[in-house]
DNA sequence: GGGTGATGCTGAG
DNA sequence: TCAGCCTCACCCC
């Protein structure tokens, strides 16, 4: 389930589990056997998340680059772990914890030039700290594309995926078909803050929950049922949780997007 | 137990 | 524009 919040959460949890100690690395599936052999036994110095990318820094200067893509998954265990699945591309372990990685789009050791090239294609990351709202605004101002498509473009903002793009536009009352550069500065700023708030919450909670408890008639966030966590994502044909208008969907940037024609109307 | 869809992205055409 | 990559959680029997 990899949008930016998931990636940053993995970075944090794995940092706590593995950084600072020598790590045993191997490839149960075999497809990353050579890379794992390079890393095996090295101390892991740090793990950095940027958008949907992860960078692992090792004591001899190697950088491991991982991108989960659509299917990739991590599992982290403390204490006595189950054996890895046959599809596990990379396993990393120290005495206390083990991390299994399966199904990544990218798992490779890269040099500094490759990393520079990669990072130059990424827009500001709302979870990376620093004041990047103005960069986001500048990026939007240059685009003709609909805001719904712009939010999936990782060079505009790094870390937003298909769930958050639909949900943050709902919460800001913006029609996804609005051309990005037509948003005024107040809307752009509010959207940036909204993205950051929602991603931060997702990182902390380990799940995407955008609905306000009051909108579904419960008191606490912990009372929100699993299937009522979102306002519009995959809710085509269902009534809007706020106004009852039927949720619409359309394809935008090769993926479906959903919105409420009333709450996100003109 | 089998079928399916998914929170992503690239590169060929 | 679209096929291809790659795994597994979840749904339905």
Image: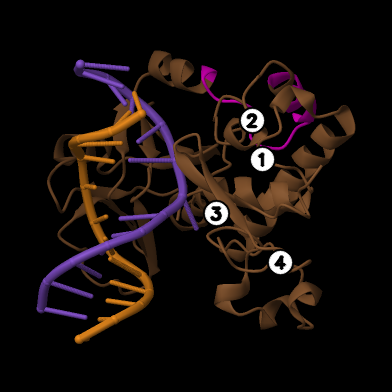
Chain colours: A brown, B purple, C orange
Same chain assignment for discs 4 and 2: yes
Residue A8, image x and y in percent? Answer: 55, 48
Residue on which disc 3 sits: A9
In the image, taking residue A46 as reference, residue A174 lies left or right, namely: right
Quadrant in the picture for residue A154: top right
Label 3 lies in what chain? A
Residue on which disc 2 sits: A146
In the rendered structure, which disc, 1 or 2, sits on the residue that comes first in sequence? 2
Look at the numbered discs 3 and 2 and tell me whether their residues touch, using CB distance below 8 Å. Answer: no
In the rendered structure, which disc, 3 or 2, sits on the residue that comes first in sequence? 3
The main secondary structure of the magenta stretch is loop
Identify the residue at horizontal 44%, vertical 37% (top origin): A254
Check residue A125 for magenta coloring: yes
State the extent of the magenta-drawn residues as a range: A120-139
| Residue toward you, A54 or A14 | A54
Quadrant in the picture for residue C2: top left
């Amino acid at each position: 389930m990899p949008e930016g919040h998931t990636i940053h959460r993995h970075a944090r949890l794995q940092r706590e589990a593995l950084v600072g100690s020598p790590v045993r690395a191997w490839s149960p599936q075999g497809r990353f056997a050579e890379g794992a052999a390079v890393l095996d036994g090295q101390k892991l110095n740090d793990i950095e998340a940027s958008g949907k990318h992860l960078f692992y820094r090792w004591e001899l200067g190697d950088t491991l680059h991982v991108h989960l893509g659509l299917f990739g998954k991590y599992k982290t265990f403390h204490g006595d772990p189950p054996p890895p699945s046959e599809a596990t591309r990379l396993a990393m372990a120290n005495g206390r914890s083990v991390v299994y990685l399966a199904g990544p789009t990218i798992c490779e050791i890269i040099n500094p030039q490759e990393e520079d090239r990669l990072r130059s294609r990424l827009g500001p990351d709302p979870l990376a700290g620093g004041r990047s709202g103005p960069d986001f605004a500048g990026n939007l101002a240059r685009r003709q594309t609909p805001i719904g498509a712009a939010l999936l473009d990782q060079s505009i903002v790094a870390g937003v995926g298909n769930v958050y793009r639909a949900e943050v536009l709902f919460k800001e009352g913006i029609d996804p078909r609005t051309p990005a550069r037509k948003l005024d500065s107040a809307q752009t700023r509010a959207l940036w803050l909204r993205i950051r708030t929602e991603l931060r919450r997702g990182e902390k909670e380990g799940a995407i929950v955008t609905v306000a408890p009051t909108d579904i008639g419960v008191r606490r966030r912990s009372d929100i049922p699993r299937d009522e966590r979102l306002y519009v994502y995959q809710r085509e044909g269902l009534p809007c949780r706020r106004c009852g208008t039927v949720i619409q969907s359309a394809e935008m940037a090769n993926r479906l997007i959903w919105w409420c024609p009333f709450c996100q109307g003109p």
